[in-house]
Amino acid sequence: MPNIFKMLQSVDFEVFGIVQGVFFRKYTRDKGKELNLKGWCMNTSKETVVGTMQGKEENIEEMKNWLRYTGSPMSKIEKCVFTNERHISKEEFSDFFIKH
């Protein structure tokens, strides 16, 4: 019997390159909200942006591609690493937000 419910996924990410001082977190939050994802993002002391995103698999895939290849207009993405991919029964966050 086919599963009529789309699986929810949780994925951590870290984006390397010129991703600080170029509104990367704001654009990431806005794209996450646009895709109906929940989670967060923040700058790190090693000049990367890290975060967690949760939502439907197809939306997670679209966000992964955005994080790998698009980002904010002034950013220069070198690479994006995804870790801790897992299926979840419900989202652990109520929104997509920027941690400070």
Image (cartoon, rainbow, N blue to C red):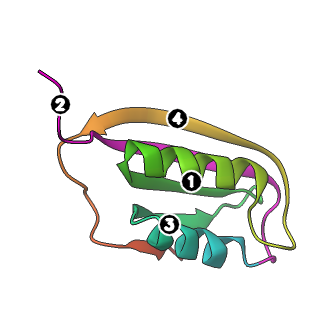
Proximity of marks 1 and 4: CB atoms separated by less than 8 Å: no
**Residue 16 drawn above or below residue 27:** above
Mark 2 to mark 4: distance in Å?
25 Å
Mark 3 to mark 4: distance in Å?
17 Å
Residue 65 lies within the magenta run: no
Q: Amino acid at mark 3?
A: Gly
Earlier along the polypeptide chain: callout 3 or callout 4? Answer: 3
In magenta, the rendered stretch is 1-22
SS for dot 4: strand
Identify residue for label 3.
32
Q: Residues within 10 Å of mark 4 (few under 14, many from 20)?
A: few
**Which residue sits at x=58%, y=38%?**
82
Identify residue for label 4.
83
Q: Amino acid at mark 1?
A: Met
Mark 2 to mark 3: distance in Å?
25 Å
SS for dot 1: helix
SS for dot 2: loop
Place of residue 37 in the rendered image (x, y in percent of width and height, measured from the top left): 40, 62
Q: Which quadrant holds the C terminus?
A: bottom right
**Residue 63's disc number:** 1
Nearest to the observer: residue 53 or residue 55: 55
Q: Amino acid at mark 4?
A: Thr
**Residue 3's disc number:** 2
Place of residue 25 in the rendered image (x, y in percent of width and height, measured from the top left): 64, 72
Q: Amino acid at mark 2?
A: Asn
Q: Nearer the viewer, mark 3 or mark 4?
A: 3
Q: Nearer the viewer, mark 2 or mark 3?
A: 2
SS for dot 3: helix
Q: Is 77 situated left or right of 24 in this image?
A: right
**Residue 42 drawn above or below residue 86:** below
